[in-house]
Image (spheres, rainbow, N blue to C red):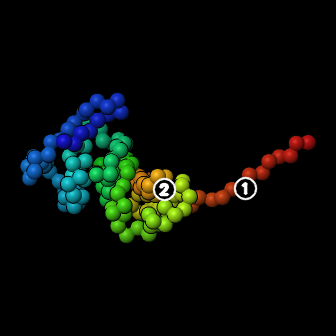
């Protein structure tokens, strides 16, 4: 069973897994069919949201993918953030998990794609975790010097 709930935890919509009949009665575009089972579940659950523009959704690692986050924003205006499995980072140049594990705890690596409006942050705590989110635009981070005024 998949559930869409509000901030308070109240269930707003749910979907039961029924094998081949899971998506009976739902219409999907070719792009949505390409998102796979998890992506289609999220799209189906959000079809019942009356005002989708500027909605925000958190996706756990079963449902989350770079393509889904881009699709939700570009087609429905839904902003999203979620944890991402390492095997769903196709074609992204990133630090290998083994390399990060050799470094100090708290290390992170961030990647962004301004064309698709998606950013991924990979960090190491007890294990390597990935977070993916919609972004408006990514600008370079600059190192700023702080000048303190001397007491006179």
Per the image, label 2 sits on a secondary structure element best described as strand
Task: Report if the CB atoms under discs 1 and 2 are less than 8 Å apart.
Answer: no
Q: Badge 1 local density, few (<14 within 10 Å), some, or many (20+)?
A: few
Q: Horizontal placement of 7 versus 45: left or right?
A: right
Quarter that holds the N terminus? top left
- 76 or 103, nearer to the observer: 103
Q: Residue at x 86, y 46 (%)?
A: 150
Residue ID for mark 2? 124
The answer to whether residue 70 shows anywhere in this view is no
User: Residue 11, how many percent across, how many down?
Assistant: 25, 32
When the figure is inspected, residue 71 is found, relative to residue 54, above or below; the finding is below
The local secondary structure at tag 1 comes to loop
Between label 1 and label 2, give the one nearer the viewer. Answer: 2
The foreground one among 55 and 24 is 24
Q: Nearer the viewer, residue 85 or 98?
A: 98
Query: Which numbered marker is on residue 125?
Result: none
Residue tagged 1: 145
Expressed as whole percent of the image width and height from the top left, the position of residue 60 reads: 33, 48
Earlier sequence position, callout 1 versus callout 2: 2
Left or right: where 38 falls relative to 18? right
Residue at image coords 44%, 63%:
97
> Is residue 41 shown left or right of residue 147?
left
Give the percent coordinates (x, y) of residue 133: 41, 52
The local crowd at label 2, few if under 14, some if 14 to 19, many if 20 or more residues have their Cα within 10 Å, is some
Q: Quadrant of residue 129?
A: bottom left
What residue is shown at x 49% (from left), y 66% (from top)? 99
Inter-mark Cα distance, 1 to 2: 28 Å
């Amino acid at each position: 069973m998949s559930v869409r709930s509000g901030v308070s935890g109240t269930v707003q919509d749910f979907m039961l897994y029924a094998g081949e009949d899971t998506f009976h009665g739902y219409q999907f575009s070719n792009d949505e069919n390409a998102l796979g089972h998890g992506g289609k579940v999220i799209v189906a659950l959000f079809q019942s949201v009356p005002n989708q523009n500027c909605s925000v959704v958190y996706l756990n690692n079963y449902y989350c993918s770079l393509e889904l986050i881009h699709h939700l924003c570009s087609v429905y205006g839904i902003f999203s953030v979620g944890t991402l499995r390492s095997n769903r980072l196709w074609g992204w140049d990133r630090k290998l998990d083994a390399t990060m594990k050799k470094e100090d705890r708290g290390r992170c690596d961030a990647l962004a794609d301004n064309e698709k409006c998606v950013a991924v942050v990979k960090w190491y705590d007890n294990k390597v975790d990935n977070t993916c989110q919609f972004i408006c635009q990514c600008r370079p981070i600059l190192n700023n010097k702080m000048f303190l005024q001397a007491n006179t």
